Image: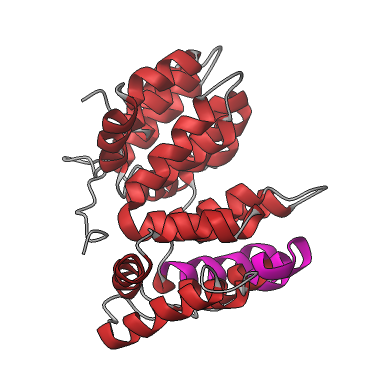
Amino acid sequence: MSWYYTPHPTVVPAEDFDASADANALRKAMKGFGTDEQAIIDILCARSNAQRQEIAEAFKRELGRDLIDDLKSELGGKFEDVILGLMLRPEAYLCKQLHKAMDGIGTNEKALIEIICPQTNDQIKAIVDCYEEMYDRPLAEHLCSETSGSFRRLLTMIIVGARDPQGTVDPDLAVEQAKQLYDAGEGKLGTDEEVFYKILAHGSFDQLEIVFEEYKSLSGRTIEQALKAELSGELYDALSAIVECVQMAPHFFAKRLHKAMDGVGTDDATLIRIIVSRSEIDLQNIKDEFEQMYNKTLVSAVRSETSGDYKRALCALIGNA
């Protein structure tokens, strides 16, 4: 299965780790006049999330201070966003990003798609539990109030854990599902969107890969071509994201990073979110894919779009290799 790529992170647990020494070094970097930002980058961008939690505990225990509060008072701007993002547990970070995408006027549908669509059931469950704990409101309820139509129904299905567990495969059913997709789109006048979002929200990624292969055998077109011809708007974006993540998640994220840096201005929120959230999962794979797709390294693209401590922090997470 192509989605069984071996994930390679760029941030791994530091060897000879000493939470107490790191806590004291961070305090020293922030004490007195001025801040040693490089020392903060050298420590926090080179530790795993679990190690950062230990540093925060040691900071509290030994120095009687809150590391997050100290970082907030010493840092600013996008550099602060990166560092504070690293200090949150992974699911808490994604919950905060989901909340941000839905809070206030307007909804950032692209952020919702990027966070929700690539997740397996287990990952979604951790996010759902964490969201309610953080915001005292079910994620599904918040999503329903901010989205509508087929797009809302698709996201809700994923959120409530409708997807079959990883490894669930039924080749006969895949043939049937490919036919259902064809009959709901290319095989008729108009489009039955419900068939599309139900199949793509329920099938395990392994199952969907077989469905997409069967679809091509049946219709002579790829599922991507079918989606483009039959759907539009947020539902199209969300279903395309699922298709890309089934086939190769790093490709999906590399494309998102490129889009965030392409043209005038930089979508820093997306840049930070992907680099922080994927650094301990598959950022090395995303880097490799980015270079193959765009003929330049991810680190060189980030360097040309960012500056100062913000740039140094992102490049430390990406790694120069």
Q: Residue at x 31, y 67 (%)?
A: 209
For the residue pair 225 and 159, the one nearer the viewer reads as: 225
Quarter of the figure with residue 14? top left
In the image, residue 142 lies in the stretch drawn in magenta = yes
Q: Residue at x 25, y 35 (%)?
A: 288
| Quarter of the picture holding the C terminus | top left
* Numbered label tally: 0
| Quarter of the picture holding the N terminus | bottom left
Quarter of the figure with residue 298? top left
For the residue pair 262 and 313, the one nearer the viewer reads as: 262
- Looking at the picture, does residue 29 appear above or below residue 169? above
Q: Is residue 184 left or right of residue 12?
A: right
Q: Which residues are magenta?
A: 123-151
Measured from the top left, where is residue 198 in percent x and y? 53, 78
- Looking at the picture, does residue 43 appear above or below residue 14? above
Q: Is residue 62 left or right of residue 132?
A: left
- Looking at the picture, does residue 111 appear above or below residue 188? above
Q: Is residue 277 left or right of residue 316?
A: right
Measured from the top left, where is residue 147 in percent x and y? 73, 62
In the image, residue 59 lies in the stretch drawn in magenta = no
What is the chief secondary structure element of the magenta stretch? helix
Residue 97 visible in the shown view: no
Measured from the top left, where is residue 300 in percent x and y? 35, 18
Measured from the top left, where is residue 169 in percent x and y? 27, 81
- Looking at the picture, does residue 128 appear above or below residue 110? below
